[in-house]
Image (spheres, rainbow, N blue to C red):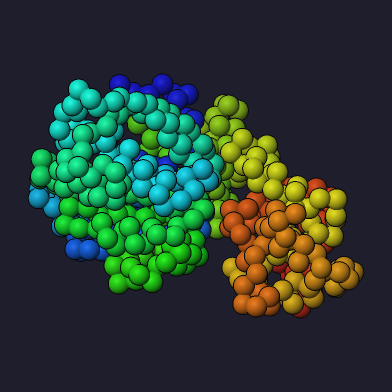
Amino acid sequence: MEAPPRSALVNAFLPSQEIDDPDRFVGRRPQVEELTDVLRVSGSVPLIFGPRGLGKSSLAHQMRRIAEGDTTLLDRLGLADRSITGDEAFVSVGVSCSRTTGTTEALLHSIITAIESDLADHLPEPSRSSTERTSSTTIQTPFLKQQWSSKHVDAPPMDGSRGDPEVHLDALCSEIATRSGRRVLVVVDELDLLTDTTGLSSLIKNRSSSYLKFLLVGIADGYHELLADHESIARQLAPTAVPPMSDAELEAIIDRAEYVLRSSGLEVTFHARARSRVIRVARGFPWFVHLLGQSALKRAFDSGRAEVAGSDVSYSIRHLHSERLSERYADSYRHAIGESREREIVLRLAAWSPETTVASPLIEQMANALGIDDARALIRQLHQTGFGAPLREVRQGAFFRFSDEIFRIYARTCPPIYPNVQKRVDAAYELADEGQPRKRGRHSA
């Protein structure tokens, strides 16, 4: 049944959820190709990592589908020869960490609970003494937090090992493999939220087998940041970095949104200027394409127009701070700025740097040229938790990076709190570029 027009309109872009439908998934062909091969390698532990907002969880969703034998995405990407079907296929479960997960032991119990619940059809019928209970699972993403209850039963100990959770996990997966003829794939997402990963590498190393494979997903610049004792499984880890998307991949998101609209009888398109504006602002981050695309699309449609104009995107950028899904960044921005106009200038100077790793002396020099004498102290403040720590030090203090690249994009595009701040930032970069004129101001993104 076709989706009602309004429903299709508001769901053409999906900024508030991961992409589970392979027909809606865009790009990432090299990563899909690499991960599909890694799933076949005996003893390997695929690990997806990268900055926030690049679609790691969506990629993990697609890999679960591929592991279970779904060929939809592989066919569309021209990778049908890499299909995992028949005896190679898996059954899978997914677990997302949160700050309350805490430790490796708590994660292990969550995995066992998920297996007993989601893969119950592949386990023996529970004995009369088994107890049925309801567990609450929290899935936490950067932009959405959902909670639901899942009912499951305690499978009876198949080897008397219920007291040892690691052995019980092994027994469960062995039983599932025997009954289903398929291996078990356990996907652990949001691994960066696990406060203590001590022992996790040992767990994965000891329990990975011919019938159990782990796939890990987390926010990190390097995979070593996600595991406290990663050296113990260095040979097994198969890290896959998720980089910013290319402009072509970002534009393909808009193409798919237009396709969804057409399929529901809505002929609404994006003008070339609107497309280029969204892509330029997004800077490789698909979440921003979904966020701005959805907002601009609704504005054009509600104005009675069948084409999204560049002005619709500009309006969405100016009102980015009022978007529900970006409220957390608005709060973080205000927290970082506090009551200091100079700190806002320094933050936006850093945000507009063309380099991912920013040189502290360069920002100090530009701030000094604007008459800000305490730029070094202001940069240090932006490293501190009292100001939300939007920056983090690298390379012994001479350089820094943004703790969250999406926040950096927000800091570039949101309206300044203090008047004339963006004009002064533009002026500083004009001076740094030795007076070379620019075709457009930095405030235009």
Left or right for 331, reference 143? right
- In terms of depth relative to the viewer, which is nearer, 203 or 240? 203
Q: Residue at x 33, y 49 (%)?
A: 187
Left or right for 217, reference 83? right
- Specify the quadrant of the image occupied by residue 408: bottom right
- Specify the quadrant of the image occupied by residue 236: bottom left
- In terms of depth relative to the viewer, which is nearer, 434 or 130? 130
Query: In which quadrant of the rendered image does the C terminus lie?
Result: bottom right
From the viewer's perspective, is residue 404 above or below residue 304?
below
- Exactly how many numbered labels are in the figure? 0
- In terms of depth relative to the viewer, which is nearer, 45 or 339? 45
- In terms of depth relative to the viewer, which is nearer, 40 or 95? 95
Q: Position of residue 105 (x, y in %)?
A: 40, 49
Q: Position of residue 1 (x, y in %)?
A: 30, 21
Q: Is residue 266 something one can see in this rendering? A: no
Q: Is residue 107 something one can see in this rendering? A: yes
Q: Position of residue 148 (x, y in %)?
A: 43, 29
Q: Residue at x 40, y 59 (%)?
A: 199
Q: Residue at x 81, y 59 (%)?
A: 343
Q: Residue at x 37, y 42 (%)?
A: 110
